Every structure is written in structure tokens, then in C-alpha cells.
Image: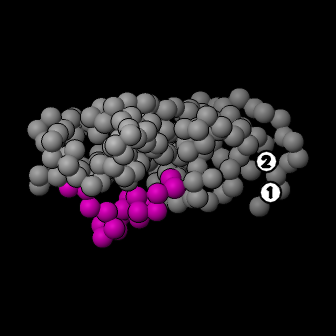
């Protein structure tokens, strides 16, 4: 494996279409109100072209800050209908206070961005939610996100599978939060140095 150069020059990010491989970091951040209920949700996505020898800017870095209903309905009309029909049921569920569903929604945002930009190369999706990564790798036992008979998690995963089916390859990888560029971007401290290979 090539050695990382010392103090390499910062280069401009290449257009997404020119990249053979992209690492798509995703994460969510929740702002709770004094009662411990989610008030706002940040959905973070950072697309990065891996290059072991030079520093590089991210191809795209975005944080969408929105209310709970907007977060749950992001990028998916089916979920918008579920929110409109079952809002009170959703608000009573335990999972609405945790990060898993919002991490899934952030992953959907990353996948949708790649599809809408006609990207067909190799992608490593990278997140720091262990349960979410296992769920996206096909392990159903660790994540149940249901309300009024609707499986919210399965709806989001179906959308992700639809958005990624045109990719040359697609893997789901876990990293600690300290190595998740989307988590750092949510905290406004995103690094311009290449992350380590996962």
C-alpha cells in the first residue's frame, strides 16, 4: 500500500462523475428539547474520493437541519404518507428518540444523491451506528422500527436498495464516530485529510 505523503498539497475535489470510487459518510445529530424529545434533526452526508497519497477536499458535504416530521419524510413519499397518517403513533414510539432511524434516513440521502447525479461507480457507505450498518448488511434481528403496522426501517432500506442498484459495487462499513467525516461535519470540524481505509 502506498505511503501517505508528508504535508501533501490540498487539491480540488474532482467531479463526482470522474471518480471510480466514492466513500459516502453519513450520520445524524439530534437536538433534544428540555423534556428529552427530539426537537431538530441534523442529517449529515459527506462524499469523499479516497486517495492514499494526497489530501483532498470532499466532493460534497451537506447538513440538512429539519423538524422531526420533515426528517422522517425526507426523500420518500411513502414515509410522508406514513407520517401524515400515523404522526401520533410515531411520536409515542421509543425509537423516535434514538438515532437509528435518522442514521438510516441520512444513509438514504447519500444513496439518493449518488443516484440523482447518475453515479454508477464503486461506493463504500460509512457510518458509526453499528446496528444500522448490520441492518443495511441484511441483519434484521437488531433493528425493529415499526408503528401502526408499518415497518419504517424496511421502507427506508427498500428506498436505499432502489437507489443503489445501479452502482458497480456497494458495501456498508462501520467506523467509530471519531472517524466518521459526516459526524465531524455535523460538529463543523470536518477534516480535509484522507481518512484511514476501512
Mark 1 lies on residue: 2
Q: Is 139 in the magenta?
A: yes
Mark 2 lies on residue: 53
User: Tag 2's secondary structure?
Assistant: loop
User: Tag 1's secondary structure?
Assistant: loop
> N-terminal of the two: label 2 or label 1?
1
Q: Residue furthest front?
A: 34
* Residue 47 visible in this rendered orientation of the protein: no
Query: Relative to 35, does residue 178 appear above or below in the rendering?
Result: below
Q: Give the residue displayed 61% in from the left and 60% down from the top.
A: 198
Q: Residues within 10 Å of mark 2 (few under 14, many from 20)?
A: some
Q: Give the residue displayed 83% in from the left and 35% down from the top.
A: 9
- Mark 2–mark 1 Cα distance, whole angstroms, equals 7 Å
Question: Would you identify the image quadrant in which residue 66 lies?
Answer: top left
What is the x, y in percent for residue 145? Answer: 25, 56
Q: Which residues are magenta?
A: 127-146
> Is residue 93 found left or right of 56 in the rendered image?
left
Q: Give the residue displayed 71% in from the left and 46% down from the top.
A: 194
Query: Relative to 168, does residue 1 appear above or below in the rendering?
Result: below
Labels 2 & 1 near each other (Cβ < 8 A):
yes
Amino acid at each position: 500500500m502506498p505511503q501517505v505523503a508528508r504535508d501533501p498539497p490540498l487539491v480540488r475535489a474532482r467531479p463526482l462523475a470522474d471518480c471510480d470510487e466514492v466513500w459516502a459518510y453519513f450520520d445524524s445529530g439530534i437536538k433534544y428539547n428540555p423534556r428529552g424529545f427530539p426537537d431538530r434533526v441534523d442529517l449529515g452526508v459527506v462524499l469523499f474520493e479516497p486517495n492514499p497519497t494526497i489530501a483532498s477536499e470532499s466532493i460534497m458535504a451537506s447538513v440538512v437541519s429539519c423538524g422531526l416530521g420533515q426528517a422522517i419524510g425526507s426523500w420518500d413519499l411513502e414515509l410522508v404518507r406514513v407520517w401524515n397518517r400515523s404522526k401520533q403513533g410515531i411520536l409515542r414510539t421509543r425509537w423516535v428518540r434514538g438515532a437509528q432511524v435518522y442514521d438510516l434516513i441520512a444513509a438514504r440521502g447519500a444513496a439518493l444523491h449518488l443516484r440523482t447525479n447518475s453515479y454508477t461507480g464503486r461506493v463504500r457507505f460509512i457510518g458509526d451506528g453499528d446496528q444500522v450498518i448490520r441492518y443495511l448488511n441484511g441483519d434484521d434481528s437488531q433493528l425493529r422500527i415499526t408503528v401502526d403496522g408499518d415497518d419504517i426501517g424496511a421502507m427506508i432500506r427498500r428506498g436505499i436498495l432502489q437507489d443503489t442498484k445501479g452502482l458497480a459495487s456497494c458495501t456498508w462499513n462501520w467506523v467509530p464516530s471519531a472517524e466518521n467525516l459526516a459526524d465531524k461535519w455535523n460538529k463543523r470540524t470536518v477534516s480535509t485529510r484522507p481518512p484511514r481505509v476501512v
